[in-house]
Image: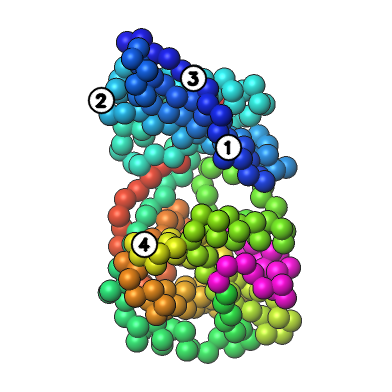
Amino acid sequence: MSLHITPLTDPAHGPHSRRLAWLASDADSIPVGTAFLRLFTDPGQEHLAELTLHVHPAERRRSVGSRLLVAALATARDNARRRVVAQAEAGSPGDHFLAARGFRTTLTLRFSRLPLADVDTTALAEIIERPHPGYRLASWQGTVPDGLARTFAVSRRAMDDMPMDDTDYGTVTWDVDRVRAVAKAVEQRGDQLHTVVAIDATNESIAGFTELVIPGNGTGDGQHYGTGVLPEHRGHGLGRWMKAESIRQAHRHYPNLGGLLADTADSNTHMRQINDSFGYTPTHTTHQHQLDL
């Protein structure tokens, strides 16, 4: 098979990364595969690259993926990257492809879905209204209010020790500009970011948060972005409390929304138990792969 690999100009550059792309085409210039390589640019992640590779099913086992991979890995090395990460559904052709080319599985992610039509609103209300002495709930849509921006950025360290097994994500430093940039990115693509937080009543600092992204038209499925509680505030049921309120808001304000999607590390038994208690059911599993260069 005559194959051409063409580097492309990809405008998907952001404040924390830049992305390169390649197109594989046959002798008739028909596209048969693509590869994207995201190069993280923040301090603490400059050694990482993230690979996304797709080959048309009819063209698999004809060296298309291998040629694209060679191009992407060469560029990763040229940019002084020490590790490349990639994700594939467990048992899929992509999963086997990565394993056969030296990538090792470093994390298993379990995906689940909560159909909003099945939500028990009475049970949610009982969880939300149960007293949590010393704490109160607050929420907003879009960008964090100015008065909470600084403490919200600080609260992001709640995710620093989330179970990630052997996956290297480097070190992510959060500040006010970064949390605002995330909200702006969601808004610019037409979706809506909803945040629920638990506030420590003794000093008005944020003890934990949960984020949910709703499609702009209010239909389809919402996607949980993350739930975290600062170590010094754990053990009070704040994660379940915040998530219950987030689910209730979605159910109340988006009558045409089908469900809510969540992905959780297989080793994060605490969050998986919370999701199970609300009625989330498994949909599929993916593997995070990593290659050391």
Mark 3 highlights which residue? 6
Which residue is at the front of the view, 249 or 24? 24
Q: Secondary structure at mark 2?
A: helix
Residue 146 figure quarter? bottom right
Percent position of residue 104, x then y: 46, 33
Q: Are marks 2 and 4 in contact (CB under 8 Å)?
A: no
Location of the N terminus (image quadrant): top left
Query: Along the polypeptide, which appears first: circle 3 or circle 4?
Result: 3
Above or below, 70 against 262 in this view is above
> Which numbered disc flags the more N-terminal residue, 4 or 1?
1
Q: Does label 2 or label 3 sit earlier along the sequence?
A: 3
Q: Which mark is residue 221?
A: 4
Residue 229 is at least partly visible in this image = no
The answer to whether residue 152 is magenta is: yes
Q: Main secondary structure of the magenta part?
A: helix
- Where residue 265 sits: x, y (%)? 45, 53
Residue type pointed to by label 1: Pro
The magenta span reads 141-159
Is the C-beta separation of discs 3 and 1 under 8 Å?
Answer: no
Residue 77 is inside the magenta segment: no
Q: Which residue is mark 1?
A: 11
Q: Which residue is mark 2?
A: 58
